[in-house]
Amino acid sequence: MSMRRNARRKAILVAAVAAVALGAAGSGCLWGREEHAPGRFCAQSNTSVIEHCVDASEGPSTAWREAEGDGELPIQMWAVEPSGAMLDDLAADAAALRAWFDNIDRAVAYVRDEQKNAESLRATLHGRLLGLLLKSRQRQEAILEEEPVRAADNFRQAMTDKASAEEEPLVAALAADKQAMAVVRAVFEQARSDAAPLRSRYAGVAARFAA
């Protein structure tokens, strides 16, 4: 029992850390009360293999009812990106990430506050949602690793072109190295800064449900 509880705690904490590591800028909903973020809500009963997905405009309750009619509790819920959106686009686009987080909040809040079913909440927090968060986290980590190098190379190329025009290659090369390092630092500092609001936003989830 203790090992199972520890495994659950670890899964929930990993989900929270994964959300933080996504690094979207800012926090809070982007969408008004009557206007919801694009995407889909999905739900699946523990006794069914069928995933019931609906447009986000229909709300998580619609997906829940369809899953409930198809099987028994617990029911896990998750939010997915708009149909056709690529993982790279989602991982690299702060606005798309915030929209996805808004839908995640709605799905989790529905299970927690409307259905008030602990087993379904547990299934939601470390079911398909966890897998989606981890995949997006891994892709964004790869993007963050590539971006400083790309930015530095672009800047270095621009400085080299400028040097050729001004016939000062040595001065330009020294400036390029210095400026490229500044670009690298700025990228990582921005990534840490962007993750800060999410840390407070999702830390509460881990604290409440890891117990």
Image (tube, rainbow, N blue to C red):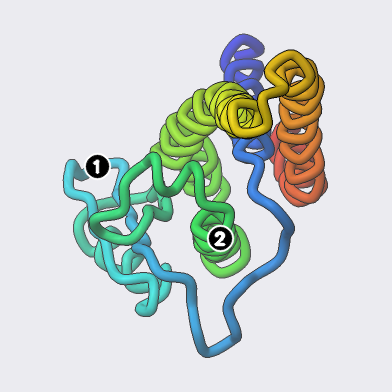
View extreme (front): residue: 167
Say whether residue 70 is left or right of residue 134: left
Whole-percent x and y of residue 185? Answer: 79, 27
Q: Where is residue 150, by image quadrant?
A: top right
Q: Quadrant of residue 32?
A: bottom right
Residue 88 tag number: none
In the picture shown, does residue 113 fall above or below 166? below
Where 99 falls versus 201 (above or below)? below
**Mark 1 sits on what residue?**
47
Residue placed at 62% from the left, 72% from the top? Answer: 30
How far across and down, in percent of the image, does residue 201 sit?
76, 51
Vertical placement of residue 174 versus 124, above or below: above
151 or 2, which lies in front? 151
Inspect the image, locate mark 1, and give the three-letter code of the amino acid beneath it: Thr
Q: Assign the N terminus to one quadrant of the image.
A: top right
Question: Residue placed at 57% from the left, 31% from the top?
Answer: 161
**Quadrant of the frame with the C terminus:** top right
Circle 2 SS class: helix
Q: Position of residue 12 (x, y in %)?
A: 62, 31
